[in-house]
Image (cartoon, rainbow, N blue to C red):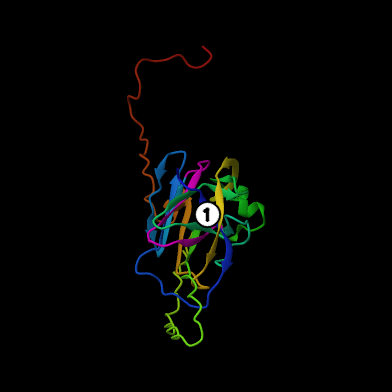
Amino acid sequence: MTRPLLLALVLLAGTACLPLPARELVRLDVVDRDAATLMPQYAHRGDAWIAGIPGHRYAVRLANTTGERVLVVLSVDGVNAVTGETAAPGQAGYVLGPWESAEIVGWRKSLDDVAEFLFTDVPDSYAARTGRPADVGVIGIAVFREAPPAPPIVLEGEARAQAKASAPAARAEAATADAAAAPQQLGTGHGQRAWSTVGRTQFVRASNRPAQLRQLRYDDAASLAARGILPRPWIAERRPTAFPGGFVADPPGE
């Protein structure tokens, strides 16, 4: 039986700063639940984009690529998907076991259920409805490694523990802004309730700064085409022709 996904119960920040990994600790993808497809990502001016379909439900897929536990703070439209707070890396999140993957399908309402994520008009998005529309259109994660277990108590007269070496400071992955961006069309709505059980666990962060920051931007396909991310749809021009039909039909009313 698959064990339930875990929420961090105790969030304690350490003092060490970890460098960014050579590879992603957690892979971030989005699944269109209604189309049952993994949504392709398009690179554009330093950002990764996905094209959402209005009304479709979606899930955020998180895949731990390491052999250790990690804490993932999930932000949707600038809102923490667990607590509903304006998102910040130091908040509560999901704990993934070694090599574990999970699909987060909505806003956490309790330990047992969520309100489903779905693509909707910006005014109907949860962020806009709660007075926070500025960051609509972005899904992001802040990932933390777990602190190692506390060393055993050293009794008087025994050898002293070796001093820990300081690690380089973590670097955030900054996303460049699109100066010629078209107006945002899609946001994430507060959909119907769905069963989604989680448990609680303790997690002590190895650092007070995330080891990985990652984000995806999204909008509808027409807006991505307007930004030059997707090709504009080609529409054949209708040219008049001398013989468009067959025999002469009666005009309307006769």
Within the magenta stretch, is there residue 65? yes
| Image location of residue 37, percent across then percent down | 40, 42
Provide the residue designation for mark 1.
6
| Image location of residue 144, percent across then percent down | 48, 66
Visible in this render: residue 91? no
> As shown in the figure, which amino acid type bears the numbered disc 1?
Leu
| Above or below for 28 versus 53 | below
Q: Residue at x 36, y 32 (%)?
A: 240
Outermost residue toward the bottom in this view: 157
Label 1, secondary structure: give it.
Answer: strand
| Image location of residue 44, percent across then percent down | 39, 60
Q: Residue at x 48, y 78 (%)?
A: 16
Outermost residue toward the top in this view: 254
| Above or below for 239 versus 242 | below
Q: Which residues are magenta?
A: 53-77
Quarter in which the N terminus is drawn: top left
Q: Residues within 10 Å of mark 1 (few under 14, many from 20)?
A: some
